[in-house]
Image (tube, rainbow, N blue to C red):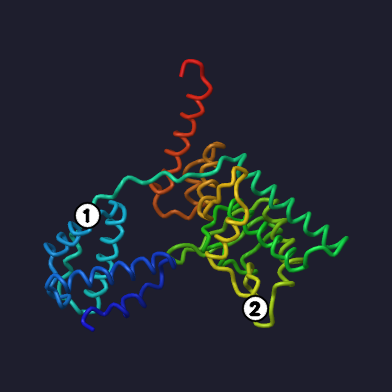
Amino acid sequence: MPWEIDAYVASLTSVSENTHDAYASDIAQFIEWAERGGAPNPEDLDHKALRRYLAYLDTRGFARRSIARKAAAVRSYLRYLKRQGTIATDPGRSLRTPKGAARLPRVPRSSEATALLDAAAEETLDLAERWETKSIGSAEDVAVARRDLAVLEVLYGTGVRVSECCGLKVSDLDLARGYITVLGKGSKIRRVPIGEPASDALTGWLLAGRPLLAKPETEPEAVFINRRGRPMGPRDARRVLEAHPLPDGRSLHPHALRHAYATHLLEGGADLRVVQELLGHSDLATTQTYTHLTRERLRAVYEETHPRA
């Protein structure tokens, strides 16, 4: 195939799973559009054709941020074709798209996050006591509760991405010193401090929970495993959050706990550069999203409480 899409997708080894899947889908859509528009080969593309493609996306009602991501995928793809010698010149080098305004993430307040974690801890303790004293329930249910608590504590207590959480290895944990090591976007490694509640939850899971779910074929180094003994994935983590809603009944996405981690650090007075390092952001502008969020929250508190607001 002149478009070499399979080879391009296979080359995306340094991006996250979500970015990998999004780029593969974006490029497939782009090629379909190009072939319909009279460009059966990559050599037929030029800057004008790429601009027409962006205009086409706009007429289809895509959000500006979605268009920007699709344009980034096209630029990446054309760079690959140029490196491979498939095209002589790269028409995507000068392709520019305005980035849409970043949507401020909706995060739970610190009291809501604490209530969620406290409820999960109480549920785990209750299940363990009932099983040990009255043999009510099952040992597997207790193990799953321990795992869920550890997942929740790690996501909120360290601010790691859900993929980083699911990818944790036993050798990544240094609970005695209060650190974990995670492999982030772009294969970047960083050490993140972990608090006592998350450390205790991890210890309880590894000692009293994980052995009950592990199977002979279970990967020894995988920290978090599902009921089948396989490493947990992001979908498993989402099910954990669905099973542990906020006090008002709202279910969170795992990434919301990362947002909460950053927001609550900044509200507590943490330095922006420190938060950037903890989150593993390569660009400070990405971290600055949370400063806008905290300002909005402060404004809301002011308007709700000050008599002259």
Q: Residue at x 69, y 64 (%)?
A: 144
Q: Decide if residue 224 is on the left or right side of residue 262.
A: right
37 vs 160, left or right, is left
Q: Is residue 148 above or below residue 260?
A: below
Disc on the earlier residue, 2 or 1: 1
Residue drawn 70% across the image and 51% down it: 197
* 114 lies left or right of 36: right
Q: Which residue is mark 2?
A: 218
Q: Quadrant of residue 82?
A: bottom left
Q: Position of residue 165 (x, y in %)?
A: 57, 62
Question: Is 170 placed above or below 115 here?
Answer: below
Nearer-the-camera pick, 183 or 246 = 246
Q: Nearer the viewer, residue 106 or 261?
A: 106
Q: Secondary structure at mark 1?
A: helix
Give the residue number, with chain letter if any, for mark 1. Answer: 58
The image shows residue 152 at horizontal and vertical percentages of: 62, 55
**Circle 2 — which element?**
loop
As drawn, which residue projects farthest toward the top?
308
Residue at image point 11% right, 62% down: 48
Task: Specify the label residue 94 is tagged with.
Answer: none
Neighbours of disc 2 within 10 Å: few (<14), some (14-19), many (20+): some
Q: What residue is drawn where x is 30% and y is 66%?
A: 26
Measuring from the top left, give residue 250's x and y in whole percent.
Answer: 56, 47
Can you say which quadrant of the picture contains the N terminus? bottom left
- Asked whether, in this view, residue 135 is left or right of residue 67, the answer is right
Q: Residues within 10 Å of mark 1 (few under 14, many from 20)?
A: some
Q: Is residue 213 above or below residue 293?
A: below
Give whichever of 137, 63 is nearer the camera: 137
Q: Amino acid at mark 1?
A: Asp
